[in-house]
Image (spheres, rainbow, N blue to C red):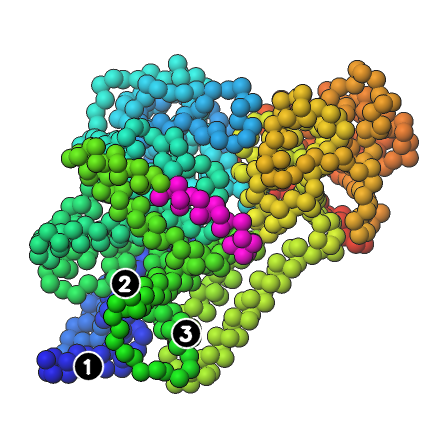
Amino acid sequence: MDEIKRKLDQIDRQMTELSLNGRLIRVAPLFLPTVGLMLGILVQACLSRSLDEVGPTFPWLWITLLVLFAIGTFVETLRHRERPRPEIVACGAMLCFACLGAVRWLDVRTPAPSDVRRLVGTDRQLATIQGRVLTEPQPERRDWCFACFLHTDLSTSFYMRLDRVKSPDGWQPVSGTVRVQVNEPTLNVRVGDRIQAYCWLHRFQAPTNPGQFDVARYLAARNVYIGASVPLREAIEVNRDRVDGLVARIRRRLGNSATAALLGHGPADEPHEGLLEALLLGQRGNIDRQTYQAFRRTGLLHFISLSGLHLGILAGTLWWLCKTAGLLKPARAVVCIIATAVFLLTVPPRAPTIRAAIIVWVYCVSVLVRRRPSPLNALCLAAILLLLRNPADLFEPGWQLSFASVAGVLALTHRVEHIISAIIHRGPQREQRRTSGPAAAVKHLSNQALGLFSTGVAAWIGGAGILLYHFYSINPLASLWTVLVFPLVAAILILGLFKIILFFILPTLSNLLGLLVSSLADLLVLIVKGIAPFKLNALLIGHVAVWVVVFYYALVVVGAFLPTRRPRLKNWLCMAMILMLVGYLGGLKWRRTHRNDLSLTVLDVGHGQAILARLPGTTNLLFDGGSLYTHDVGTRIILPFLDYIGIERLHAIVISHHDIDHINGLPEVAGGRRVDHVYGPDALLSQSETVPTARLLKQHLLSERLAIEPAPKTLRIGPTHIQTLWPPDPITLNDHVSDNDLSLVSLIQFADVRILLCSDIEEFAQHQIMGRNPELKANVMVLPHHGSARTLDRAFLTNLAPEIAIASCSRADLERGRIVSGNPAGKIFHTAENGAITVCVETAGVVTVNVRTIQTGD
């Protein structure tokens, strides 16, 4: 034993004497090739002009460089064959993989001559297409507050691989995948069906509001660039001779069987059932909105996104069961490999799950061949395989967060645990004595909690930069909550696995176990919702530049891995970098919440209105928040915009009237932000019990402890003066005034600049305002009734003479000529054409306009 210990100590000393690069090459020889592959993909992606075009670099150039690097590495290896230098091979491999990454990017992103992308331009076009259905049709979710007022059926969507398209010259072959959306429920279409559809083909539109989810980029990462819009299900002809592949049939049967075994029926229809589906089967579509937001705010969203944690717990449980049954390590490894493959066929094939499966397989194979596994090397292998499969995954937030968190766990857990232990045991060290009984149990539990907390902190450090860049916030308490709920999550996963297995053996016992699992799931939801309101759960910063994230990870690398003979100098360097980072983020947050100028943003919500006014100082006012055609505008557009600019408090929401296109996004906004007041006109207050939309809005606001208050006639906030010009006292109006003519009209004055928000007033109210305010002028005006040419009195626009006129309108109304197209006194902007429009008024009275010009397909 002494000889063995001596050799192990010698190996440790040799590893310590190596440089960081040398240790990486010996422990994880795939690390540098992985870095090279990422750099090659990144360089070629930067050279690309758009999502679906190649850049100026040709594949043959990369292939030539690949061959040259490979030959050079081989020659250098032969020259030093007597004294091998692993650094040469590693660096050569990194350069070769960089070229391979660029080639793979070009191979995946370059459209074939028959690709459907070459047939569809910026304008949509009618077509008849044929192909096979790749995914099960998914019904549209309508769990937002005002979904009950939609007069359309639930739409369904699925992906389809094209075979042919009909042109004026007849049928011609075509390739590519399209996303099909049918504006009605589609019950007769299944995976593997060959269908023919009469549809509109179109490119996906880029986001038109800051912070809005980029559907075009998301689908382009999956090589889907074209959408097919089918107005009626009768426009789809289904060929019943379905030919499913073997893997597709296995996946469908395993998925259906696992769902039935877990829930006892089909898809989830209860909150705890949706949570169980997400935890055990990776199906997140049935989690209710409140539960999802609570997990996101607490930083525990990774628990309901199937990842390595879940697969690790399940594999560890299975390993323990096999060990208890007396199986040797090779037999356990084989069982785990088979079980992981079955699990991978049962759940959706997402990158975190595949990455975890590869790591499990690498560990099991190393057991079979009697080699010591390297977790970092296994992680690099998973990254290489996934990026070669789809290089666009490198730019996906989920992929980045998954690998960054695992890398943080592998690289930082022991360092974090050492630091925490040193802090806890600071002071005179007592002699360590062996304990037994309850004291030993308590010590064991404390060590386990410390290890779990250290792992959570390491994962948080690894993923914090990615979270900040993509989701604009930091969750400082996520590690603490991870320790709190992890035992419960582990119990649900283990017992849920037993329930699924017992369902096929002892159904009665499985049902009894299901009661326990459901109770634990309810308890988990209760705990997460209970801790979600803590203010420190999420520190909203807003969008940051890429260099901030790069600087953060440079700080992590310097603090954890920079070798130095002067520890004090390293500590001072890290402290300086921390102060620079915290100072910059703090200053950025301060500038976004404390302003000297006035900013007014008219969001592009289609036919509707949502206007955010950021006044000098710290006050934020939201005027309306709704849309007639954009579903769930509060969650999809308004809240992401507030996240993007770092606004977590609204001092007031001003509601102009009860039309659904002005209010149907406000319940989600009130639930997702701190709101001090909600103001509305007298007509809205009097109709809050009789008008269905007003009644529903009142109910949801009351659930957030908010009540609609009468809009003040005048409001002075610092240097800003806000006046309600219309309506006057309701007693003076006759009974024939329309609801639109009772809308609030607000005048905002700052630095001698007047901004008029006209809401939906029509000709009657326009005449009344001109008669009551003959000297009224406006520098900026949001046009009445979404810029409708039918209800606008041209004299109203002429007399007010706005230098800047804005119409919050839909693209269809603009294209059909229903919207005012000219401004005799200045410029006119349309949200349907210019996207979100921001007007900035400086303290000197200078007015500037920023727009996001809409581009289709990029």
**Rendered location of residue 804, percent (x, y):** 75, 39
Q: Amino acid at mark 3?
A: Ile
Q: Secondary structure at mark 2?
A: helix
Q: Nearer the viewer, residue 381 or 414?
A: 414
Q: Nearer the viewer, mark 1 or mark 3?
A: 3
Q: Identify the residue at horizontal 22%, vertical 42% (top origin).
A: 498
Q: Amino acid at mark 2?
A: Leu
Mark before the other along the chain sequence, 2 or 3: 2
Q: Identify the residue at horizontal 54%, vertical 53% (top origin).
A: 534
Tell me if mark 1 has few (under 14), some (14-19) or many (20+) residues whose alpha carbon lies within 10 angstroms of its own. few
Q: Identify the residue at horizontal 83%, vertical 33% (top origin).
A: 725
The residue indicated by pointer 1 is 9
Q: Nearer the viewer, residue 311 or 833?
A: 311
The residue indicated by pointer 3 is 424
The residues bearing labels 2 and 1 have C-alpha atoms spaced at a distance of 22 Å
The residue indicated by pointer 2 is 376
**Rendered location of residue 745, percent (x, y):** 78, 33
Q: Which residues are magenta?
A: 520-540
**Rendered location of residue 515, percent (x, y):** 31, 37
Question: Do we see residue 174 in this rendering?
Answer: no
- In the image, is 191 to the left or to the right of 827? left
> What is the magenta segment's predominant secondary structure?
helix
Quarter residue 90 falls in: bottom left
Tell me if mark 3 has few (under 14), some (14-19) or many (20+) residues whose alpha carbon lies within 10 angstroms of its own. few
Is mark 2 in CB contact (under 8 Å) with mark 3?
no
